[in-house]
Structures are given as C-alpha cells and as structure tokens.
Image (spheres, rainbow, N blue to C red):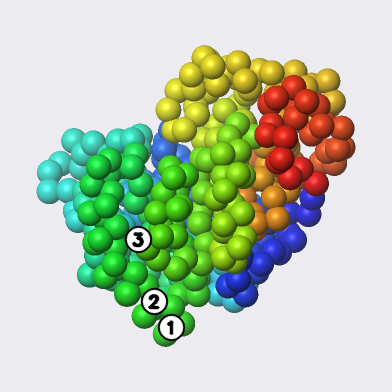
Amino acid sequence: MNPFETRLLGNTGIKIPSLGFGGAPLGELFEKVEHLQAIETLDEAYASGIRYYDTAPWYGHGLSEHRLGNLLHQKNRHEYILSTKVGRVYRPFKGDPVLFDGSPWVGGLPFEWNFDYSAAGFERSFLDSTMRLGLNRIDLLVIHDLDRSYHGKSVSNKLQELETGMEWLKMMKNSAAIQAVGAGINDIEMIPLFLEHFEMDFFLVAMPYTMLNQEPLKEIFPECERRGIGIIIGSPYASGILASGSRKESKYGYSAASEEMRKKVQSIEVICEANGIPLKAAALQFPLAHPQVSSVIPGALKAAQVKENLEMLKIHIPPEFWVELKQTGLLHPDSPVT
C-alpha cells in the first residue's frame, strides 16, 4: 500500500492521506515523553511526508496540541490536514502542579476539565485549541467521547445538549472556519444514535474496527456508505496489542489485555509468522482495505516508530494470508481485504 495515497473522506470532497499521525501518545498516555523526543518524532513524521495529524485537548490535557502546534505552525498551512476535538472544557488546576492527578494520562499538563457539548462549550474548546496549536484554522473538528463508556445512562441527556453544539458546528462549517464535522467513537452502538439525531460528515472510529473486531461490517458501515459518511480508524493497533503482540503487558482498549484477547492475538501471530508477515503490517493494512475507510492514524512515541509505520504499509501481503485468517475464524468472512 502507498502510505501517501489520498482518499476522499465520504462525501466531503476532502482528500486525506491513507496514513496519518495520531497525537495521543505524545500526550503521555502510557509513558512520559521528553520534549526533545517529541520534537524528533514529529520532525520525522513531517520529513517522511505524513500530512494528516490528529490531536485533542484530552490528549495530555493540552500537551499533545502544544507539541503538534510547535511543529505545524511553522509549516505551510496548505500542505497538511489537521483534526482536533471538542467536548471538554479546561481550566487551570488551582493546587500544586506536582499534586495534579491527570489519570489516565501518566503525564500531561495540570489542567482540570468537564464535559460540555453545548454551543458555548464548543466555542470555548475550539478557541482554546487554536491558541494551543498556534493556528487559526482547523480542518476536521470532531465531537469527542460522547458515548456510554464515559456517560453511561446520561448519554441521552448529552445528545440533547449536543443539539446546540451541532448548530454551532454547522455555523462554523458554513463560514469555512472548519471543513467537516465528525464524531470520535469508542462504542460502536453510538453511530446509529448519532445518525438518528444529526447529519455527520465522518466518524473517527477508535476501537471497533481492527483485526480483532469487525462488528461494524454488518449494518453500520453499509449505512455510512449509503449516506456518504467517511470513516477514519483511530487505533489500528487496538491501543497496543496489535503492535506489541500477545505478551502479558499488552494493552487492549486502553487497559490490560484479557487472556482471551491475548490468545486470539497469539493465533494471529502464528499465521503471521508462517507467512512472513509482520503483525503490525497486517494490523495497519487491514482497515484500509475497507472502501469506506479513508485513513488510519497510528500514534508514535519515537522517530523510529514513525519510520516503522511507513514501512509496514509498504509491505506486500498476499491474498492467501487473509484467506487463512478467515478460514480459521480469526477474521469475519465478509471483511474486505484487498
């Protein structure tokens, strides 16, 4: 696969590269990242030709946006696509920064937050992001984490709150301040709820479409195709295990992988090894075979990981490899693979 190939994002008319850069790890999700290391990682990404960058205020409580902005505000604004997110509003932590608990981030900045999906909340979040990034324009603006894993039974209340937020997003899109509106999804059942209430340009799907989960194939992706809604895959490595492999400390869904999930990955690893295919190559290329998917945006902590992601997309994977995964029940039989 060509990592620099551009694909249309649904019916938006926007073309984005098939390989982007996910900014969550630079917000220090699982480990601290020194400032110079972050600079080297982003410099490598841009020098290598990566031209789609995704971040969010949530990633390190503003740290990821600061770090990406440090790179991108120096570049030609017409050369790259940028997405960030709305849905949280931040304020400075009033105590000693040393005492700030930013979990689940192991690092990040000392800022507290609350969810806010209203028009006022979105406007505040957007303006704060532009200042952290040092940029006056965001291409793709994403409604962040409006799902049951964060809001439980109050999801319906948040969707009602979002009605004013969506009016603000429409206004921003009509004024060309942003180009497209999406929603970042962890729980796949939220997509039908969004489609029931709102017109969406795209979904940034974090976990539910990887080599370990093809649930959206049956109804959700076909409905997105029917409506011309684009899909971006936010965590092609399933938050870690499809990059690290089945070892004990592997992460799945942003927490420790279960024994059942580790065994499934072990079975995939056996077939990968027999065919001479790196697990990471299969994990990156699998989502991109779906015609509705425009881009995958793996993160990177080091410059070497940026280089590796690029190389993984260039590896040729023969059809027989995917056939074997389907025959052994490790992939849904209807999964597009070429």
Circle 3 crowding by C-alpha within 10 Å: few under 14, some 14–19, many from 20: many
For disc 2, the marked residue is 170
Q: Secondary structure at mark 3?
A: strand
Horizontal placement of 68 versus 104: left or right? Answer: right
User: Of residues 21 and 209, which is closer to you in this image?
Assistant: 209
Kind of residue at disc 3: Val
Q: Are marks 1 and 3 in contact (CB under 8 Å)?
A: no
The residue located at (25%, 42%) in the rendering is 153
The residue located at (12%, 43%) in the rendering is 95
Q: Position of residue 11 (x, y in %)?
A: 60, 71
For disc 3, the marked residue is 86
Query: Looking at the image, which residue sits at the far left?
Result: 94
The residue located at (65%, 56%) in the rendering is 292
Circle 1 crowding by C-alpha within 10 Å: few under 14, some 14–19, many from 20: few
Badge 1 or badge 3: first in the primary sequence: 3
> Does residue 314 sit above or below 273 in this rendering?
below
Circle 2 crowding by C-alpha within 10 Å: few under 14, some 14–19, many from 20: some
Tell me the distance, in whole angstroms, between the alpha carbons under discs 1 and 3.
Answer: 18 Å
User: Of residues 192 and 305, which is closer to you in this image?
Assistant: 192
**Numbered tag placed on residue 252 in the rendering:** none
In the rendered image, is residue 289 in sight? yes
**Numbered tag placed on residue 174 in the rendering:** 1
Q: Secondary structure at mark 1?
A: helix
Image-quadrant location for residue 194? bottom left
Kind of residue at disc 1: Asn
Q: Position of residue 67 (x, y in %)?
A: 44, 55
Horizontal placement of 136 versus 295: left or right? Answer: left
Q: Are marks 2 and 1 in contact (CB under 8 Å)?
A: yes
Tell me the distance, in whole angstroms, between the alpha carbons under discs 2 and 1.
Answer: 6 Å
Mark 1 vs mark 3, foreground winner is: 1
Tell me the distance, in whole angstroms, between the alpha carbons under discs 3 and 2.
Answer: 14 Å
Badge 3 or badge 2: first in the primary sequence: 3
